[in-house]
Amino acid sequence: MSAAITLEDVTFCYGKTTIIEGLSLKAQAGDVLSLLGPSGSGKSTLLRIIMGFLAPSRGVVRVRGQVASEAGRVIMPPEERNLAVVFQNLALWPHLTVEGNLAFGLRSKRVPDAEAAKRIAQVLEDVGLAGTHMCYPAQLSGGEQQRVAIARALVLQPDAVLLDEPLSNLDIGLREDLLHLFSKLFREYQTTALCVTHDPWEARELGGRVIMLDEGHVVSTGSLDELDPAHENPFVRLVCRHLAR
Ligand code: ADP
């Protein structure tokens, strides 16, 4: 089976400034990957390249094995990539109920109403929000809104879910609960997930592989528990110290 997402030697420049340089990675179907890097290391840019909102300056992006973008060109538009995104600010529609938020994407994918209703009921139960169909986002707590956001991604049955610092605005207890929920859901739905974060603890809690980025380069791909405290990269050393605390 083709990998869900493959990046081959991807470089991205804004004008003369190189933001990402020669980056390769492969997310197989069902893989959970964290992209861990400090602020400004190119994580969000990379997600936008994977989504198809930006074309790489060099290299190739494949989705389900097909060339989706190549140097200077988006070949497969974002809506054909079958990727779902959970943004940091969640971007729930405030004027739509929970059901309306989940139905929106299904309608644009022309999923029949009966099938959509079945999927919505199932995913709301799986995220622990059964019975909230008719609530508006503002009537829900921050943690519940977060569950709606992940439900809205999973209900589309995407080839991969991309998460852009989705838990940054929540308190620590809630973040732990949600990370464990996310990891359980990714396993149950056998979803490929790529989660961008600047927080080593979050990357470790999510489980799965961790790819560390610094200044647009991959600086480590191993387990966070096996990092070398004397690593040549200062961000890797910082993460080591942080996790040892
Ligand atoms: P991260 O998500 O890791 O914080 P970003 O991908 O947002 O990093 O940004 C990586 C680098 O690209 C930063 O130095 C940022 O200033 C720069 N950058 C982001 N967007 C633009 C843009 N539109 N024009 C020029 N530089 C940009």
Image: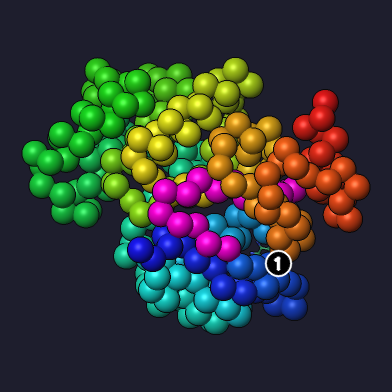
Which residue occupies the foreground of this view, 65 or 168?
65
Position of residue 223 measured from the top left corner of the image (x, y, whole percent): 68, 44
Magenta part of the protein: which range?
A: 25-39
Image point 87% across, 43% down: which residue? 229
Image point 71% across, 67% down: which residue? 19
Amino acid beneath label 1: Ile
How does the figure colour the protein chain or chains? rainbow
- The C terminus is located in which quarter? top right
Ligand 1 is within 8 Å of the C-beta of the residue at disc 1: yes
- The answer to whether 236 is drawn above or below residue 151 in the figure is below
| Residue 47 in sight here | yes
Image point 36% across, 26% down: which residue? 127
Q: Is residue 38 within the magenta segment?
A: yes
Position of residue 239 measured from the top left corner of the image (x, y, whole percent): 79, 40
Q: Quadrant of residue 17?
A: bottom right
Q: Which residue is mark 1?
A: 19
Instruction: Name the secondary structure under disc 1.
Output: strand
